Structure formats: structure tokens, C-alpha cells
Image (cartoon, rainbow, N blue to C red):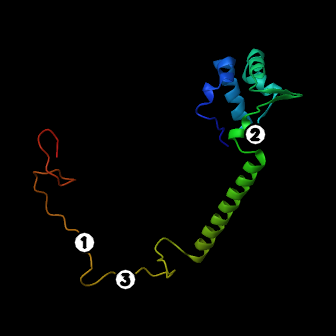
């Protein structure tokens, strides 16, 4: 899960008052909260592992965090990030879609389907074109030794075409 911050968030007066180090703690804990789907709750042990108690106090003092019994809540977290229940539901939908796709691929594999099938599902490839619209194989003339042997483009002495 991505942790979303507004690109103008660093201009918030609370961020300026907290300072760069405390904002680094805020951002890192926000990533932790997104990864663990806590809706912006950060346990005390995570906050103090990632930063100092001084930085934690700054975040609380400026209003970027609210103190709870066993940690801190990021009050602005859900303004930019989806709730945990939405993320879980989305992940379930993605997993189900992937499961259906894999089952479909397995079914095709069992039927002997491959990339050579045409849109109608026939196993035989389309017959080659005949007549006016038929393509002829490309014939490469013998190398003249004045052009590049691979590209068959004329090359000057300074290697420009």
C-alpha cells in the first residue's frame, strides 16, 4: 500500500514548526501505518524506534499527532489515504480477479489453446493470402559494400547516415 502525502504538505505551518527531523519521523511512521493498515495509528514503540522522544513531542505539540493510550493517531492520515477496510476489500477484489484470470489461462492450456488461434477459436491458422493483396517475402539485395552491412544504409566517414 502506498502512503500518500500532498505535494504541498511540507508548507503546512505545523510541519514548519515541527522541523525537518520530526517531519521525517512523521513520514516514516505514516509509511508504517499504511503498510500495516492501522488507519493512521502509530504504536509508541514504533514511534520511539524510528525517532526520538523529542521528535514525538514536537509532532504532538504542533498537532500532527494526537496522543492515545498505547500510541499516537495521525489526524490527517485519512484525508489522503484510504481506510484499512477499503484497502482490504480492494486487495480481495484484485486477488479474485487474478484467480479468475489464472483459472481461465489454465483452462485454455488444458484445451490446447495457444497464440496461433485466431479470433473465432479455430485451431488452424488462417490460409495465406493469394492474389492481389498477397505479401511477398522481402528480398535483400547483395551488399554493395558502400553501405553498412547490417542496416544497408549509406555511412559517411564520420559514421553519420
Q: Nearer the viewer, residue 38 or 159?
A: 38
Q: Which residue is mark 3?
A: 127
**Real-space Cα separation, disc 2 to disc 3, in angstroms:** 56 Å
Mark 2 or 1, which is nearer the eye?
2
Position in image of residue 38 (x %, y %)? 79, 39
Position in image of residue 160 (x %, y %)? 17, 42
Mark 2 or 3, which is nearer the eye?
2
Identify the mark nearer the N-term, 3 or 1: 3
Position in image of residue 103 (x %, y %)? 66, 68
| Residue sitting at x 76%, y 23% | 49
Left or right: 99 with respect to 120?
right
| Residue sitting at x 65%, y 41% | 2
Q: Nearer the viewer, residue 103 or 32?
A: 32
Q: Is residue 118 above or below residue 20?
A: below
Position in image of residue 66 (x %, y %)? 81, 27
Disc 3: CA contacts within 10 A as few (<14), some (14-19) or many (>=20):
few
Disc 2: CA contacts within 10 A as few (<14), some (14-19) or many (>=20):
some
Q: Nearer the viewer, residue 139 or 2?
A: 2
Mark 2 and mark 1 residues within 8 Å of each other at the beta carbon: no
Q: Nearer the viewer, residue 75 or 106?
A: 75
Q: Which residue is mark 1?
A: 137
Count of marks, rendered view: 3
| Residue sitting at x 16%, y 46% | 161
**Real-space Cα separation, disc 2 to disc 1, in angstroms:** 59 Å
Numbered badge on residue 36: 2
* Residue that lies at the very extreme toward the right in this rendered image: 69
Q: Quadrant of the N terminus?
A: top right
Left or right: 85 with respect to 102?
right
Q: Secondary structure at mark 2?
A: helix
Image quadrant where residue 29 sits = top right
| Residue sitting at x 48%, y 77% | 119
Amino acid at each position: 500500500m502506498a502512503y500518500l502525502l500532498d505535494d504541498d504538505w511540507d508548507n503546512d505551518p505545523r510541519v514548519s514548526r515541527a522541523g525537518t527531523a520530526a517531519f521525517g519521523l512523521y513520514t516514516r511512521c505514516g509509511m508504517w501505518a499504511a503498510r500495516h493498515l492501522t488507519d493512521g495509528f502509530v504504536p509508541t514503540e514504533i514511534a520511539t524506534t524510528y525517532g526520538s522522544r523529542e521528535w514525538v513531542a514536537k509532532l504532538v505539540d504542533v498537532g500532527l499527532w494526537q496522543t492515545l493510550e498505547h500510541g499516537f493517531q495521525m489526524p490527517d492520515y485519512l484525508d489522503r489515504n484510504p481506510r484499512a477496510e477499503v484497502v482490504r476489500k480492494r486487495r480481495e477484489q484484485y486477488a479474485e480477479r487474478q484467480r479468475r484470470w489464472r483459472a481461465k489461462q489454465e483452462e485454455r492450456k488444458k484445451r490446447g489453446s495457444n497464440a496461433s488461434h485466431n479470433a473465432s477459436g479455430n485451431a488452424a491458422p488462417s490460409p495465406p493470402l493469394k492474389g492481389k493483396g498477397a505479401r511477398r517475402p522481402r528480398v535483400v539485395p547483395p551488399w554493395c559494400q558502400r553501405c553498412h552491412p547490417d542496416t544497408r544504409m549509406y555511412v559517411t566517414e564520420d559514421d553519420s547516415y
